[in-house]
Image (cartoon, rainbow, N blue to C red):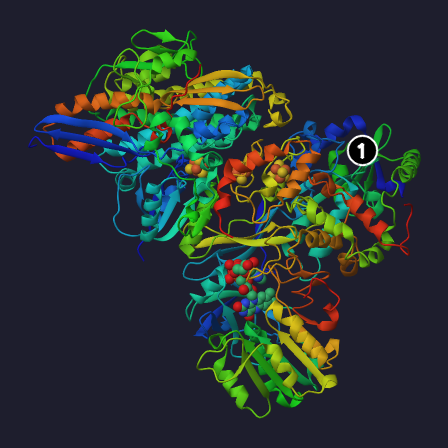
């Protein structure tokens, strides 16, 4: 057996340095990263990267910073298992492996010129944050921007400072809710779907971007359809098990679609007839 | 059929040929394992080879996409070092049936799709394929004529076809003709042998009847109607989720990626292993949600991946008719029966040959 | 960082799994480079009174004395690993549970059976929480090393949730059903690299049933192969009798 | 020593299984001196009932992971005896080979990892990694080689896979024979170094004459797999009469049963085999005995370890011979056995009774089975070497303690522990000594 190094292997990694780690909640941390070779991660909001800890594993994680930020990129990681817990144990200055970006991301060019309704459930805010930051950076290219954010408890609220800021902005309509309040919570209580009827929007001119836990989609879509949103203007981002990110390993397949390659963002129209999607 | 692309090998010289092949490079060929089971194995001498065999337990895809393959090597000392690697060797595959050649063509399609799987392409370059045509069905499980894999088309370097008292050999590449040269056992083909070959093919078309009561071109339509067919529920009861059907399939290529570190925890490799959509952890994500929890959904997914999804994506049916999945299934789930049941259930419109 | 302190303990078992560890051969020296083994009665006289970073526990819990002892070990251990079938699923000791305990005692010890009070066999996790599972009768050494490394890396080890057949096929064995005999492979957790089938024997299910075994389907299979169902039940009981004590 | 002494070794280390030693001396007089077996009983004999006798080797192998191959072989012999199956010549050769591997593996473990630390004055092999790195490396290497030999022949050493009733489910290929030959040759030089190393070690001097019991037969081969039961007192009975040898009895303080034949106690194991069959050892093993200064009839129990070394030499040489024989004869692959084919009643089934008597590393092991006409167990009985030795060990202690009573408590404890360890007791097994009434 001969063995050779293949630098052009699609599995090759780029080394990324952790500039900073910021705990957001008990389970989530925000990692600020730069490539060691000073190159820039060129991505679209909604795309993801494969993050590697050598000897432990490789996982898909959405990029959650603005694609226009040329200084660094960010990921928000919830500790649930092997790799994610190990990531949480790292410190600033540590090196991780990254390949990507992968997936299609949100169709920015299509959305521009329209109103945007963002609906985030829990960690779903991660990929959407990238879209929010992008639309704020390019505010004049979008119509009305509505952001609805929901999570289980106030303690699970992510990006609290930014939310504070968004909610103060005059050019954004921001609303937030929790399923279960605690004594300090002053805001809305209830499922995220309860916020939708209150949004004042022009259905024909609006794109909705929805990301959240699997159970959320069905109910949110029902509300959006009730509002009169056309099926091809509802954008959903899915989570599936992924190993390669390149449409080969077969793990993320939703019927004939590869979540990693054809998605993770799909219009409701694309998947509405697919039993395995929702 | 240009006569100059054909050669003749006396049957008595096949052993000589195999032994000579063995001096050129490593040779893998079908070997008998008992109980009507065969396996491609590297051989030491011609005696080990079974010229008459039914499809091996695992298809020769194992040489292209090893069951366990290192993707990256890394060391974690003061500095992180990562190197993607590939291991390959020169190998001659002898005796590959046309169904398995079709399987390799399917793999080529997927793994040379962008982003290209460099390691696969490098290994593929170093493998020579010598085909062996079947003159009759291997057993009742095969359905190669249905998918058109019973005749040699492309995908090989040399193709051996057994005639009455000699082999006629088609040279399909310069790699193939090199072997003809180096072994020096072949004679040029004459018009008469070409005619005999033609006669054989004609005879074959009578033997290799389509075994499934429809035609290949109706598959998309058939499957578009069958997502909720009752057969899937039946499979729910039967299937053991053992993953045998996918492991033996020449066109399955799903995998898992794992890590292996040495005891110092500093050096290691990332590797991939074959994996299967039939297994529990396949589609599970954090939080324990499994997107194909039911065995019925998994079995359905398997069939759709063979007969529907990849037709859109790659323009090919991803079944080669080798019959391995039916042969290996201890629960007795048989591909031909499943397809027939779909056709039976899918009322009208679908063109039916019989039923 | 000081080396983690590791100890080995045994309960009702054959000690084969500990022996598998001692049998690793020279790589054992590499293991001793990274961990400090403070107690390993089978091969060492050293004793340790402090806490353990990692305790490997072999054997099933079969009497009150053992219950007390395992609880104490749990209290003293940061990480507790169940080693081998006896510890992870009850193993062969579970066969006892099919009988009336008093009768079993009398059969073996006659009238003095009262001196040998015995409980229903239980796996370790059925008595105290377990952090890592190393299945198998005996354990498969490569898996032991994998788990050890996971422990040192501070990451979980997931016992494969798929059946032995997966590994068996990759090893290109002739399937036992082709030979006309029952094999527990389709309903048994993988991870042993289909050790037994590679050596011409059937799988006896020593690693425990898969999380979602289709036992009804397997019964159908046996019918088709004309193998009495009885055999399957007996085979499952050989190692998996204690499953009935699993919660949920 | 002030005339009072209490020694309480709970969970004796570096032996298989749980045993305690209790010694009490009051006013210079030995009051108590016993070896307690405190292993949790696992009731194998009880739950074998109702199972197929074909499963016996698989299950009884799990009695003890250390003598797994030995239990398997004894069990197979008993089952085949009950079913009336006659193993082929090839099968017998392969079983003999397996038994050699078992003796080698177990002896090496015992000699190096369990006994050597005592002789070198340390509590375990761990400190030896620093002080005698060569020795430890050699030990681990030999251990690995033995394991690999078993891996090739039967899949693994702990609970062998392919040795079953009727023969083997997998037969070694020619490559396998070659591999085994290569490894055995490698082992040979390490065994030579072992002989040399131990020839320079002084073992404790202590003697007590006793009856030594082992298999004997009329062939030229050192009997391990087949034979009658013989003793140094000149008796010989067939294996079916084992109950007349073991004469089980109970002592009030211990749970496991004891045995005696013509004297108060008897001993089994490497030393017993050497004492009875030394002439049949391979010439090289005889040479090693000379080098190690081991002469029959040796009555120093500490020298059981030395007898084990001598047996190692014999086993390596005889294993090589067996492989060469197989090589010459060629292997008949049609003899492969399909396991569990009895599900369909293809293999013979009949009501019967059978006895397996095999010399395993620690001595004579007996399995005695009775099954019904469907091959289902009715009764099972196992007599384990350690049980046969326990009473002998106690009598040794009884003689030893007064002889060394003037030493310090630590020295006495160590001397006793070493004595017990010298017998290589396997306490896991020994709780399976049971009395079942076969009529
Ligand atoms: C497109 C995409 C974007 C994602 N973005 C984020 C993000 O921004 N932030 C975030 O915290 N998480 C994100 N995830 C989820 C994240 O990938 C999983 O939480 C992570 O893979 C779990 O890995 P682990 O090693 O920590 O868990 P493990 O210990 O491996 O397993 C825990 C559970 O996670 C499942 N799991 C393991 N590997 C994967 C995988 N590759 N894909 C999906 N599930 C897996 C396992 O089945 C198991 O149930 C995203 C997932 C996808 C598919
Ligand atoms: S699991 Fe098997 S090998 Fe391990 S201790 Fe139990 S009986 Fe012995
Ligand atoms: S031999 Fe057993 S483990 Fe292997 S494929 Fe057949 S049923 Fe599965
Ligand atoms: S094949 Fe089966 S019985 Fe053998 S080690 Fe694996 S799980 Fe255990």
Q: Quadrant of the N terminus of chain D?
A: top left
Q: Quadrant of ligand 3?
A: top right
Please indicate whether residue D264 sits to the left or right of residue A141 in the image: left
Can the viewer see residue D123? yes
Please indicate whether residue B83 sits to the left or right of residue D225 in the image: right
Please indicate whether residue A117 sits to the left or right of residue C192 in the image: right
Q: Say which of B305 and D152 sits in front.
A: B305
Q: Position of residue B25 (x, y in %)?
A: 66, 38
Q: Which residue is mark 1?
A: B186
**Outermost residue toward the bottom in this view:** A170
In what element is the residue under mark 1?
A: loop
Residue name at image x 55 percent, y 62 percent? B286
Q: Quadrant of residue B90?
A: top right
Label 1 Cα neighbours within 10 Å, binned few <14 / some 14-19 / many ≥20: some
**Circle 1 chain:** B
Q: Position of residue C39 (x, y in %)?
A: 30, 44
Would you place residue B250 above or below residue B180 in this image? below
Q: Say which of D202 and A269 sits in front.
A: A269
Q: Say which of D74 and B46 sits in front.
A: D74
Q: Quadrant of residue D267?
A: top left
Residue name at image x 46 percent, y 74 percent? A25
């Amino acid at each position: 057996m001969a063995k050779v190094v293949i630098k052009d292997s699609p599995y090759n990694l780029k080394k990324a340095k952790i500039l900073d780690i910021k705990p957001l909640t008990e389970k989530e941390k925000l990692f600020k990263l730069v490539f060691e070779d000073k190159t820039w991660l060129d991505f679209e909001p909604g795309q993801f990267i494969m993050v590697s800890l050598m000897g432990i594993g490789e996982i898909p994680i959405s990029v959650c910073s603005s694609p226009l930020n040329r200084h660094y990129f960010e990921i928000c990681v919830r500790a649930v298992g092997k790799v994610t817990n190990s990531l949480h144990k790292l410190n600033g200055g540590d090196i991780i492996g990254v390949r990507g970006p992968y997936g299609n991301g949100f169709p920015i060019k299509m959305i521009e010129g329209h109103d945007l309704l963002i609906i985030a459930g829990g960690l779903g805010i991660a990929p959407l944050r990238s879209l929010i930051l992008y639309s704020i950076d390019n505010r004049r290219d979008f119509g009305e921007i509505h952001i609805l954010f929901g999570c289980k408890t106030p303690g699970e609220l992510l990006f609290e400072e930014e939310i504070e800021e968004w909610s103060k902005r005059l050019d954004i309509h921001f609303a937030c809710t929790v399923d279960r309040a605690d004594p300090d919570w002053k805001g809305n209580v209830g499922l995220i779907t309860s916020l939708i009827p209150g949004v004042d929007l022009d259905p024909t001119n609006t794109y909705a971007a929805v990301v959240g836990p699997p159970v959320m989609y069905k109910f949110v879509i029902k509300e959006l359809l009730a509002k009169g949103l056309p099926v091809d203007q509802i954008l959903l981002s899915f989570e599936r098990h992924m190993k390669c990110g390149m449409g080969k390993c077969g793990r993320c397949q939703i019927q004939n679609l590869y979540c990693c390659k054809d998605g993770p963002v799909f219009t409701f129209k694309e998947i509405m007839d697919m039993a395995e999607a929702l | 059929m240009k006569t100059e692309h054909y050669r003749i090998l006396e049957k008595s010289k096949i052993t000589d040929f195999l032994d000579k092949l063995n001096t050129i490079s490593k040779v893998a060929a079908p070997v008998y394992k008992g109980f009507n089971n065969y396996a491609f194995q590297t051989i030491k001498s011609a005696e080990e080879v079974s010229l008459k065999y039914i499809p091996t337990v695992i298809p020769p895809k194992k040489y292209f996409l090893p069951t366990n393959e290192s993707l990256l090597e890394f060391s974690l000392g003061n500095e992180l070092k990562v190197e993607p690697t590939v291991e390959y060797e020169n190998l001659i595959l002898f005796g590959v049936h046309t169904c398995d050649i079709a399987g390799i063509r399917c793999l080529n399609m997927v793994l040379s799709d962008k982003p290209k799987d460099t390691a696969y392409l490098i290994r593929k370059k170093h493998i020579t394929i010598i085909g062996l045509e079947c003159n009759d069905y291997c057993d009742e499980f095969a359905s190669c004529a249905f998918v058109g894999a019973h005749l040699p088309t492309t995908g090989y370097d040399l193709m051996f076809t057994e005639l009455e008292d000699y082999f006629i050999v088609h040279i399909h590449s310069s790699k193939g003709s090199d072997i003809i040269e180096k072994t020096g056992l072949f004679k040029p083909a004459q018009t008469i042998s070409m005619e005999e070959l033609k006669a054989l093919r004609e005879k074959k078309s009578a033997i290799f009847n389509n075994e499934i009561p429809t035609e290949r071109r109706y598959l998309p339509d058939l499957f578009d109607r069958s997502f909720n067919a009752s057969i899937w529920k039946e499979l729910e009861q039967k299937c053991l989720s053992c993953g045998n059907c996918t492991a033996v399939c020449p066109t399955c290529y799903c995998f898992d990626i794992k890590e292996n570190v040495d005891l110092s925890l500093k050096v290691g490799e990332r590797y991939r292993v074959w994996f299967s959509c039939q297994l529990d952890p396949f589609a599970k994500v954090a939080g324990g949600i499994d997107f194909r929890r039911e065995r019925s959904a998994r079995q359905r997914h398997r069939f759709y991946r063979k007969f529907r999804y990849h037709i859109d994506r790659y323009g090919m049916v991803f079944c080669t008719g080798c019959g391995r999945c039916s042969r290996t299934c201890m629960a007795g789930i048989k591909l031909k029966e499943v397809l027939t049941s779909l056709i039976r259930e899918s009322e009208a419109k679908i063109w039916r040959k019989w039923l | 960082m000081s080396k983690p302190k590791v100890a080995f303990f045994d309960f009702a078992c054959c000690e084969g799994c500990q022996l598998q560890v001692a049998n690793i051969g020279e790589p054992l020296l590499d293991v001793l480079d990274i961990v400090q083994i403070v107690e390993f009665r089978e091969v060492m006289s050293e004793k340790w009174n402090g806490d353990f970073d990692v305790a490997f526990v072999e054997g099933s819990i079969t009497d009150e004395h053992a219950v007390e002892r395992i609880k104490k070990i749990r209290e003293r251990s940061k990480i507790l690993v169940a080693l081998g079938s006896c510890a992870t699923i009850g193993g062969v000791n579970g066969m006892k549970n099919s009988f009336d305990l008093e009768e079993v005692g009398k059969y073996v010890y006659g009238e003095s059976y009262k001196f040998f009070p015995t409980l229903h066999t239980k796996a370790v996790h059925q008595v105290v929480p377990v952090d890592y599972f190393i299945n198998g009768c005996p354990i498969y050494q490569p898996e032991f090393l994998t788990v050890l490394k996971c422990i040192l890396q501070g990451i979980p080890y997931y016992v494969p949730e798929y059946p032995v057949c997966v590994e068996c096929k990759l090893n290109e064995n002739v399937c036992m059903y082709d030979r006309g005999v029952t094999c527990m492979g389709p309903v048994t957790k993988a991870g042993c690299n289909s050790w037994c089938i590679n050596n011409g024997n059937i799988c006896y299910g020593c690693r425990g049933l898969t999380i979602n075994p289709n036992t009804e389907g397997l019964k159908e299979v046996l019918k088709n192969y004309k193998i009495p169902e009885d055999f399957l039940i007996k085979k499952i009981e050989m190692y998996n009798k204690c499953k009935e004590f699993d919660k949920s | 020593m002030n005339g009072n002494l209490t020694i309480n070794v709970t969970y004796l280390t570096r032996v298989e299984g749980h045993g305690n030693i209790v010694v009490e001396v009051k006013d210079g007089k030995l009051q108590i001196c016993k070896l307690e077996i405190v292993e949790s009983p696992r009731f194998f004999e009880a739950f074998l009932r109702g199972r197929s006798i074909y499963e016996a080797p698989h299950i009884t192998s799990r009695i003890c992971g250390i003598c797994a191959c030995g239990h398997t072989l004894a069990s197979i012999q008993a089952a085949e005896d009950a079913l009336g199956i006659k193993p082929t010549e090839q099968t017998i050769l392969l079983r003999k080979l397996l038994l050699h591997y078992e003796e080698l593996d177990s002896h090496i473990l015992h000699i190096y990892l369990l006994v050597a630390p005592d002789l070198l004055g340390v509590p375990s092999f761990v400190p030896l990694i620093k002080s005698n790195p060569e020795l430890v490396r050699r030990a681990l290497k030999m251990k690995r080689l033995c394991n690999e030999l078993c891996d090739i022949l039967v899949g693994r050493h702990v609970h062998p896979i392919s040795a079953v009733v009727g023969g083997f489910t997998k037969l070694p290929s020619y490559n396998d024979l070659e591999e085994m030959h290569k490894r055995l040759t490698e082992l040979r030089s390490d065994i030579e170094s072992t002989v040399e190393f131990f020839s320079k070690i002084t073992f404790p001097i202590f003697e007590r004459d006793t009856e030594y019991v082992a298999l004997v037969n009329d062939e030229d081969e050192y009997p391990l797999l087949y034979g009658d039961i013989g003793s140094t007192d000149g008796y010989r009975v067939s294996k079916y009469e084992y109950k007349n040898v073991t004469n089980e009895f109970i002592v009030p303080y211990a749970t496991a049963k004891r045995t005696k034949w013509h004297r108060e106690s008897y001993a089994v194991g490497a030393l017993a085999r050497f004492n009875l069959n030394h002439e049949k050892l391979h010439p090289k093993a005889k040479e090693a005995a000379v080098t190690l200064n081991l002469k029959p009839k040796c009555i120093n129990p500490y020298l059981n370890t030395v007898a084990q070394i001598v047996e190692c030499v014999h086993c390596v040489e005889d294993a090589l011979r067996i492989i060469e024989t197989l090589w010459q004869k060629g292997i008949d692959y049609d003899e492969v056995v399909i396991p569990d084919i009895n599900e369909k009643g293809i293999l013979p089934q009949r009501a019967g009774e059978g006895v397996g008597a095999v010399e395993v590393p620690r001595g004579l092991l007996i399995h005695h089975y009775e099954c019904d006409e469907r091959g289902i167990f009715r009764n099972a009985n196992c007599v384990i070497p350690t049980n046969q030795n326990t009473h002998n060990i106690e009598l040794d202690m009884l003689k030893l303690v007064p002889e060394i009573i003037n030493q310090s408590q630590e020295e006495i404890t160590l001397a006793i522990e070493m004595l017990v360890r010298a017998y290589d007791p396997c306490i896991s097994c020994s709780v399976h000594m049971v009395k079942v009434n076969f009529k």
